[in-house]
Image (cartoon, grey):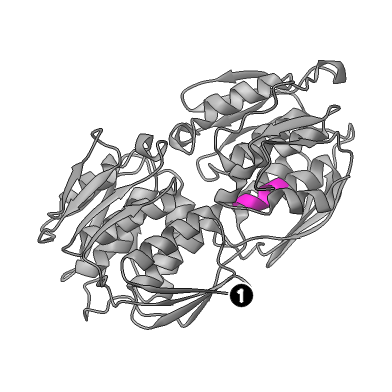
Amino acid sequence: MSDLHDIQIGPLKRAQGSIVLPGSKSISNRALLLAALSSGTTSLKNLLDADDTQVMRNALRQLGLKVLDQENNICVVEGCSGKFPVQDADLFMGNAGTAIRPLTAALAMQGGNYRLSGVPRMHERPIRDLVDGLRQVGAKIDYELQEGYPPIKIIASNIQIKDVVKVRGDVSSQFLTALLMALPLVANEAVKIEVIGELISRPYIDITLKLMARFGVKVACPNQHSFIIPAKTSDAVYQSPGTLLVEGDASSASYFLALGAIGGGPVRVLGVGSESIQGDIAFADALALMGAKIAAGDDWIEVHGIKNANGKLNGITIDCTQIPDAAMTLAIAALFAQGPTRLNNIASWRVKETDRIAAMAKELKKVGATVQEGSDYIVIQAPNSLANWQSPSEGIDTYDDHRMAMCFSLAAFGPNALKINDPNCVAKTFPSYFTEFAKIVS
């Protein structure tokens, strides 16, 4: 699919089958960095092989780490016990927020000189709150172009933690994640981090804390806004667990779970279930609220059609703070719902791979939906009748955003075929998406 300018899908009637999910992006990039910072060698199994995780792997190699990709999505990382061998590097981070933010914090602890840049969209994605947090402990970081955004330069400095470290939590949870993962490297005494204001996407912080614990650092959480990092007992703060299995990606699961509802099912996803540590697993609960028939085990979820008598999903109003990525799939499910669907608290969509609220509103209108958007919400009303569904000749634009492409594949279950532009953008997190999609739809 690498040479495709667009892809034509549908109209589709049925979805049935099972899908083995690729590894979670959020877990994969956190695990790669923690393994690199650890003492010992870590074998990461089911590691996501996609653009964002290759960005992290390549950066670690450039920093002097041995990162060996093996068959069957296994990656072996030889840790550096907290000190990167290379102390001067210019790193290209693509558009991988889960890579640039935690790596920035880890690099600021190294006492070296580094530059981090990315694609043009990365230079529009905020990093100020993280930089402000790092400056509180003595890090010297300069903005190269626009204040508050990459590219950035990290200048060798003496890190000293003299007070509580404060960070805003209302733009991206990745800033807090970055500080949590990096500050143990310099925690000669216990370090307290306080979140100022609302903390969005709390489940992603829980992923961070659970993975840190797997690598030997247990953070205390006296309340929802305070985190206490223990004083280090040796220079090698993180310890390799030996082997770590990466869960399937719960955000990617959302597309197939939605297929199981609108396409009749049963569709089963393998690799995530009731034991998942990912917040986006709550997408299944949201889909159930819309009327989908759902069953789950420890490491699988299955959707088998819709229980509502009219055969349609029902519109819902839902707070999406905990499922910001998977909430995009709800916006497409709304095309198959009776009544409006309102997704609240999605301001973080504005600073993702694209402005996802604006992009979603524009493309949903192309297929005939009625859409209202605000600064942190979107309301979707399905086309009034089959005749009101549209198949735009110009196609659905995807804005170099993998989730836009994957989401709108579901809209091909309307009455018309649909053209999706630049389907290759799914390589960011799920390179084989359209191949796997084709296996279970008809």
Is residue 374 magenta-colored? Answer: no
Give residue 300's position: percent from left, percent from top.
72, 63
Q: Amino acid at mark 1?
A: Glu
Q: Residues within 10 Å of mark 1 (few under 14, many from 20)?
A: few
Give residue 391's position: percent from left, percent from top.
78, 22
Outermost residue on the front side: it is 3
Query: Who's the residue at 10% across and 61% down the image?
Result: 158
Check the image and report above or below for 116 versus 70: above
Query: Who's the residue at 59% across and 18% down the image?
Result: 372
Which quadrant holds residue 151? top left
| Quadrant into which the C terminus falls | top right
The kind of secondary structure element at disc 1 is loop
Location of mark 1 (residue): 71
Check the image and report above or below for 53 versus 423: below
Check the image and report above or below for 172 versus 48: above
Part of the protein shown in magenta: 251-255
Which quadrant holds residue 178? bottom left
